Image (tube, rainbow, N blue to C red):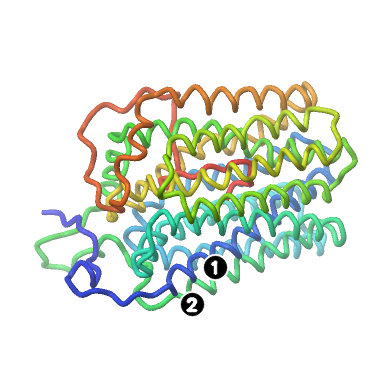
Amino acid sequence: MTARVSVPSPAAEGVPAPRSLRPLAGVLTAMAVSLTGTRVSAIALPWFVLATTGSATMTGVVAFVEMAPYVLVKALTGPVVDRLGPRTVSWTTDAVSAVAAGLVPLLHALGLLPFWLLLVMVAVIGAARGPGDLAKEVMVPEAAELGRIPLERATGLSGVTERLATTAGPAVGGGLVALLGPMAGLTANAIAFALGSLVIAVALPAGAGRAAVPPPAGAGEEERPAGYWQLFREGFAFLRRDPLLMTIIVMISVTNLLDVAFVAVLVPVWAQETGGGPGAIGLTGTVWGVAAVAGSLIAAAVAHRLPRRTVYFVGFLLTGAPRFVVLALDVPISVVLVVFVVGGFGSGFINPILGAVLFERVPRHLLGRVNALGDSLAWAGIPLGGLLAGALVTMTGLIPVLLGAGALYFATTTLSGLRPEWREMDRERGHAGASPAPPASPALPAPSASPPPAPVRAAAGEPAE
C-alpha cells in the first residue's frame, strides 16, 4: 500500500500555530534578491554577447541555452521539491547558481572564457534556477497560512516583490553596464544568488518549507511512499484533468515565448539601432517596473474583491501588443516610456490572479509537482523565444518582427478569452490548497504543449525567471 499524504502541520493536528510573518518575509526577501540579480543579468548578458559578437542570432542562442535547461529541469524536479522540501531545494540551487554566475566574470578576466564555455555556464545557471524558483513559489501558501494572510494578498505581495525586482534590476543593470561594463552586472548576479541562498538557509524559522510527502519508509515497514515516477504521474494526471489550468497554460506558453523574445533580443537590438544603448534598456525596464509595482500593490489590496476574469484580460490588453508596436514606430523616447508605464501597470494584476487560482485549485501535497509541470509547460516556448527572434531579426529586420509579434500577442490574449473555462476563475475563491481533483475528463485540445507555472506565471514583458 502506498502512502501519499502530506506531512501534517500543527494546524492539521488541531494545534493552532502561532501567527508569524517571518516565513513570508523570508521567502519574499529571498525572491527579491535573487530576482533582482536575474534582472541585472538580463541586461548585462545580452549586451555582453552583442558587444563581443555583434550578432543578434548569437544573443538568441545564449537565451535559448539558459532557458531550455530551466524549463526541462523545472518540469522534472516537482517530486524532488515535494520529497526534500522547498527550503532545502531553494538554498542549494541558489548556491549552485551563485558559483556558476561568479565563474563567468572570473574566467573572462583571466582570458579563459571562450563562447562555448560561456554557454556551459549559462546552461548551469538556467538548470539551477528552475527548481530554485519553483521552491520559493511553493513556500508562499504555507507562509501565508503561518502569517494568517489571505492567499490573494500573499500572492499579490509576491507579485509586488517580482515587480520591485523588475524595477531595481534594470536600473542597477543599466547603470552597471553603462559605467563598468557587462561583467560588473554578472558579478552582481552572482552576489544576489548567494544572498538568496543565505536568507532561505538561515533566516526562515525551523519547520518552514517542510516536505509535502514522507521520506522513504525504513526496512520492514508495511507502507512505502510513492516512487519518483509515480509522484510525477500523479501531478501530470491532476493537471491534465483541469480544463481551466490547461487553457491558461496554452495561452501563457505563447505570451511567454513573445515576452522573452522581446526582452532578450528585441529591446537590446532596438536600443542598439536607436543609439540608446544599455541606458535605454535600463530606463524602459525601470519605468515598466515602477508601474508594475503600483499595479501589484493595488492588486494585493483589492484583487480579492474584483472580478478576476475581467481584470486578467484587461491587464493583458494593456501589457501586450502596445509595447511591441511603439518600438516599431519612430516616436520620441517619452512616448515609449508612457506606453511602458501603462503596460507595466496592467501587468501588475496578472500574476497575483494566476497564483491565487493555482493555489486554490491544487491540493497542497500535489503543489510542487503540479507547479513544476505547469510552469514548465507554460514556459516551454521561452527557450525558443530568443532564438527565433534573433534569427528573424537577422533575416527581416527589427520592425517587421516587432509588428508581427505584437499582432500575435493581441490575437492570443483576446481570442482565448472566448473559451468557457475562464468562468471558473471566480468559483474557487477562498479554498486554498483544498480543492479536490476535478472530475476525470479529457484535456482540452491544445497546440502541442502546455504550461503555466503551476503557479501559472506570465513573464509579462519581463525577463524569464
Q: Which of 114 and 28 is in front in this view?
A: 28
Q: Which of marks 2 and 1 is nearer the N terminus?
A: 1
Q: Residue 243 occupies which quadrant of the picture?
A: top left
Could you tell me which residue is drawn at 78 percent across and 62 percent down? 184
Residue 454: where, in percent of width, then height? 41, 45
How far apart are labels 2 and 1 at the CA level?
10 Å
Element assignment for label 2: helix
- Relative placement, left or right, of 302 versus 428 is right
Could you tell me which residue is drawn at 68 percent across and 65 percent down? 102
Could you tell me which residue is drawn at 10 percent across and 54 percent down? 1
Which residue in the structure is indicated by mark 1? 29
Residue type of the residue flagged with mark 1: Thr
- Residue 75 visible (yes or no): no
Compared to residue 22, the image places residue 368 above or below, namely above
Q: Which mark is residue 203?
A: 2
Compared to residue 274, the image places residue 154 above or below, namely below
Residue 388: where, in percent of width, then height? 66, 29
Q: Nearer the viewer, residue 228 or 402?
A: 402
- Residue 349 visible (yes or no): yes
Residue type of the residue flagged with mark 2: Ala
Figure disc tally: 2
Q: Which of 253 and 226 is in front in this view?
A: 253
Could you tell me which residue is drawn at 56 percent across and 64 percent down? 96
Q: Do the residues labelled 2 and 1 touch (CB within 8 Å)?
A: yes
Q: Which of 261 and 69 is in front in this view?
A: 261
Q: Residues within 10 Å of mark 2 (few under 14, many from 20)?
A: some
Q: How crowded is mark 1: few (under 14 residues within 10 Å), some or many (20 or more)?
A: some
